[in-house]
Amino acid sequence: MESIVLKLEKKINEGGKVNFEEALLLSKVKDIEELFKAADRIRNKFNGIKVDLCSIMNAKSGRCSEDCKYCAQSAHYHTSVEEYSLVDEKEALKLAVENEKEGVNRFSLVTSGRGLQGEDFKKAVGIYKFLKENVKIKLCASLGIIGYEELVELKKTGISMYHHNLESSREYYEKICTTHTYDERIETINNAKKSGLKICSGGIIGMGESMEDRIKLALELQNLEIHSIPVNLLNPIKGTPLENTHPLAQEEILKTIAIFRFINPKAYIRLAGGRNLLEGFGVNCFKVGANATITGNYLTTSGNKIAEDIKMIENLGLEVGIKKRTY
């Protein structure tokens, strides 16, 4: 008799979508290798062998008004995170050029706070205009909860994608953040889509949520037709409410990524924060459905070197989206 894994793989290949009950069955299969291999085949069918590399710059750090329990930058908690105001255009350009030369596809400024406003937002627009004039790397932005008009203005600077995570399921979200709502996040995503931007939105796993929560998040992202889905692993930060959270088992992480691929067959499934918690910086994730990664450092933690990531990807028979550029 055909397994549920093969039945759902066939359904996806024929244009169907995996629902909650089906995804839950996938999470309980005994033959985990069959699940992993099928997820890899789905990745190859819909996305080929290209792996998308992106890098980020912590462009404004700390003193955030929001109370997200996982975050080192929240002003509600006492952490050792560095605090500084918005960087200038020359600092941003320096890092963008370095990453572009190394072969990274995308570069994003990420700012702390509920949402960039006022003079800071105007300054960010200026930085993006400056970057667009001086680099060829694709530009993304992660500036928090902002309105439609601001997103239209950002689009005009030349950025192609807006990042705004949902973080977890609707049900679990209220356990990790109380200063803004799930619907505010979805509204920001919809406004960004309306402005013509592609969307990068995912979440964090390992915060104490259940597999059911992760599946609900993946289905929410499916419903929103998200282009790029970053999967972060909680890296417990001393001073935050989640500092003593135990890490997920490696197999649980791989299973989650595989199920995300079944639910979102055409999306980039992107390894993000917490990769240092994975064996070999997540090499096995690229065998179970992942086809993108943040490379270099993250917001408040260290990451893998770009050259090492490219070597790892190519050793798997996959390809980075672009080759190194020379100037």
Image (cartoon, helix red, strand yellow):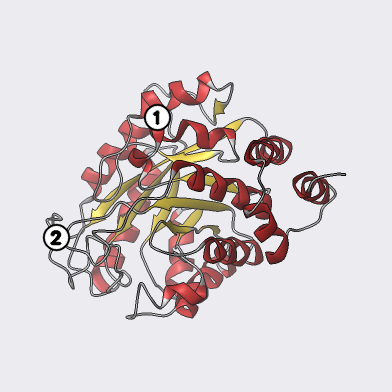
Say if 246 sits above or below 99 in the image: below
According to the image, label 2 marks what residue?
79
Near-viewer residue (23 or 48) = 23
Q: Position of residue 125 (x, y in %)?
A: 34, 60
Q: Secondary structure at mark 1?
A: helix
Q: Position of residue 29 (x, y in %)?
A: 67, 49
Along the horizontal axis of the image, is 204 left or right of 187? Answer: left
| Furthest-right residue in this view | 1
Marks 1/2: CA distance?
Answer: 28 Å
Along the horizontal axis of the image, is 277 left or right of 244? Answer: right
Near-viewer residue (1 or 238) = 1
Q: Amino acid at mark 2?
A: Thr
Which image quarter is the N terminus in?
top right
According to the image, label 1 marks what residue?
280
Say if 144 sits above or below 158 in the image: below
Q: Amino acid at mark 1?
A: Gly
Q: Position of residue 265 (x, y in %)?
A: 68, 48
The answer to which image quadrant residue 179 occupies is bottom left
